[in-house]
Each structure stands twice: as structure tokens, then as C-alpha cells.
Amino acid sequence: MEEEYIRIGKLDISRYNKLCEKTIITDEVIITYKQIEHINEERLGIYEKYKNQLEEIIKNPDYIIADPKHDETGLVIKEYEEDIVVVLKLNTTNKDKKNSIIIIWEIKEKRLQRYLLTHKTIYKKE
């Protein structure tokens, strides 16, 4: 059976573990074809623009910020010419599931600064 997702890479659990009360049980990160379709519907061209950088974003983010609206979910931010955010849902409960990218979007510096003031920062690149 053909897989329903693309493997992105592996995350450093020690960098992400404060996003969850439970232990993250896998370091694998994927994106499903369904989520790619959703991203393309919401933000035309954004997946194609950043698909080759997703592994680097997950491995070496500039910031990881807790998503206040969703448990076990983080805003993974890497600064390029445009700031970009990858929303990552972490797996803490099912050994058969992977950590999954939910959405990708670009933000401006002003919004990044607002996030840093109003959300819990889990990780900041030194």
C-alpha cells in the first residue's frame, strides 16, 4: 500500500519536549497529502515555496512557541526573508503515529514579536 504521507525528517525531542505534558514518543515528522492539499487551498504556492526547507526548519528552528489553542502543538518558526511558521502537531500517545505538519504560513516581523510577547516560548536559537 502506498503511504499517505511524505517523510520530512527527524526532530530533536529535547528541543520540543516542553510543548507537551506527556513524553513525545517518536522523532519522525511527516506531512500528509491531505494536509498538503489543505495548505495549497489556504495559501496557494506556500508548500511548493518551502517544501525543500521543511526538514531544516524542523531540525533547526529559530523559535518554538506553544500553540495556546491546541495541546501538543507548536509554532515552529524559521526566519528567512519572510518569517515562516510551520505548525507541528506532536505525537505523545500512539506509537504507530508520527509528528505531523499541520499548516505552513508566512508572518511579518511585527507578528513574530507579538507571538513572542503573548505566547510561551519553548525554544529560542542562541
Image: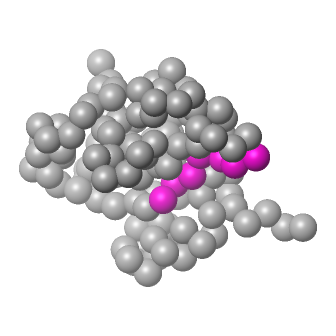
> Residue at 76% of width from left, 46% of height from top?
96
Q: Is residue 77 left or right of residue 107?
A: right
Q: Is residue 38 left or right of residue 95?
A: left
Q: Can you say which quadrant of the picture contains the N terminus?
A: bottom right
Question: Residue 118 at what x, y percent from top left?
Answer: 14, 41
Magenta segment, which residues?
A: 96-102
Q: Is residue 123 visible?
A: yes
Q: Is residue 22 left or right of residue 114?
A: right
> Residue at 54% of width from left, 76% of height from top?
37
Q: Is residue 12 visible?
A: no
Compared to residue 110, the image places residue 56 above or below, namely above
Q: Quadrant of residue 92?
A: top right
Q: How many marks?
A: 0
> Residue at 53% of width from left, 43% of height from top?
90
Compared to residue 37, the image places residue 98 above or below, namely above
> Residue at 38% of width from left, 51% of height from top?
70
Q: Can you say which quadrant of the picture contains the C terminus?
A: top left
Farthest residue in the right direction?
1
Question: Residue 77 at what x, y percent from top left?
Answer: 34, 43
Q: Indicate the colouring scheme.
A: one colour
Farthest residue in the bottom direction?
41
Question: Residue 58 at what x, y percent from top left?
Answer: 49, 40
Q: In this rendered view, identify the residue nearer to me: 7 or 73.
A: 73
Q: Does residue 43 belong to the magenta stretch? A: no
